[in-house]
Amino acid sequence: MEAQLDQLQHAANQGGSTAALVIAQNQLSRLGGLGQTIEHARGVNLVSIRAEVTAVVAATLATVQQARAAAAGGQAAELALHEAQAEAHRTTGDFLRDFYERRIFDKYLNFTSTEDERAYREREEARQKEIEKARAEGTPEGELRAIELQQAQLKDAGAHGATDSPDYQRWTNRLEAAKSNLKAAMAPTVTHERSPQPETDPLDSIAPSATVDPEVLAALRASGVTLADPSQQGHGVAARQAATSQGMARV
C-alpha cells in the first residue's frame, strides 16, 4: 500500500483523483491501527475483529488494484501528450523556417496596394513574435497556440495568392494534423479533471465474508498476522507474536 501511495500521488499531481489518494491513506492508517488492536487482543476480542480484518484487507487490495490501473493509465496519457507536444514543436519549428526564413510563399503573394502589403507584413511580423513566444513556453498549451497562429498566418498568405504554391496544401494539412493530435492528447487530462471524484471508501460496501486475495494473505503473514479462509468455520485470526508471548498457539 505504501508503494502504491507514491503512484497515486503522482497520478493526483497529473490531474488524477485526489479522493483515491485520501482513501488509500486512510486505509493504510486503519491497517496500522488494526495491527495494534490484534497485538493486544485476547479471546473473544479476536473473534469480534475478524470481520473487520477481512473487510480491510479486501478493500485495501481493491484500492491497490485501482491505483495500479490509474497509474498505468496516467503514465500512458502522459507519454502520449509528451510525444504530441514534441511533434507539434517540430512542426511549428519547420513552419518558421519555411515561411519566415526560406520565404517559400513570397513569390506567390500579390497585393492591391502598397498599404495592403505593409499591413500584411505588419501582421506577419507580429504573428512571428507571438509564435516564438508561445513555443518558448515549453507547454502543450503554448504549442497549440503557436499552431493556431501559424494557421492564421498561412490563411492570411493564402488570401494574397499563396494558395497557388504547391506547398500551401501540404502545410495546411500538416498544421491541422499536428493540432488535432495535440488536442486529442490533451483531452484525457481535461476530461479526468472534470469527472466526478469518488467519495466513499471501498470498506463501506465490502462484505466481511469477502475472500481475501492470496497476495495480501502473504503480506499479512510476513508481518505476523494470519487469516484463515473466511468461508470456513473458525475464528480465522491469529497473532504469531501474541501467541509466542502469551502462550496462545492459535485462536
Image (cartoon, helix red, strand yellow):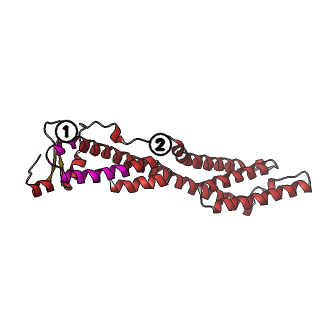
Residue 137 horizontal side relative to residue 249, left or right: right
In the rendered image, the vertical position of residue 54 relative to residue 127, given as above or below: above
Stretch of the chain drawn in magenta:
25-50
Question: Residue visible at 17% across and 40% down?
Answer: 229
- In this orientation, does residue 36 appear? yes
Q: For mark 2, what is the residue?
A: 197
Q: Amino acid at mark 1?
A: Pro
| Residue 152 placement, left or right of 80 | right
SS assignment for the magenta stretch, majority = helix
Name the residue at 75% across, 57% down.
127
Residue occupying the point 68% across, 57% down: 95
In the rendered view, does 122 fall on the left or right side of 174? right
Above or below, 88 relative to 184:
below
**Within 10 angstroms of label 2, few (less than 14), some, or many (20 or more) residues?**
few
Residue under label 1, please give it: 230
Q: Does the magenta-highlighted stretch encompass residue 44?
A: yes
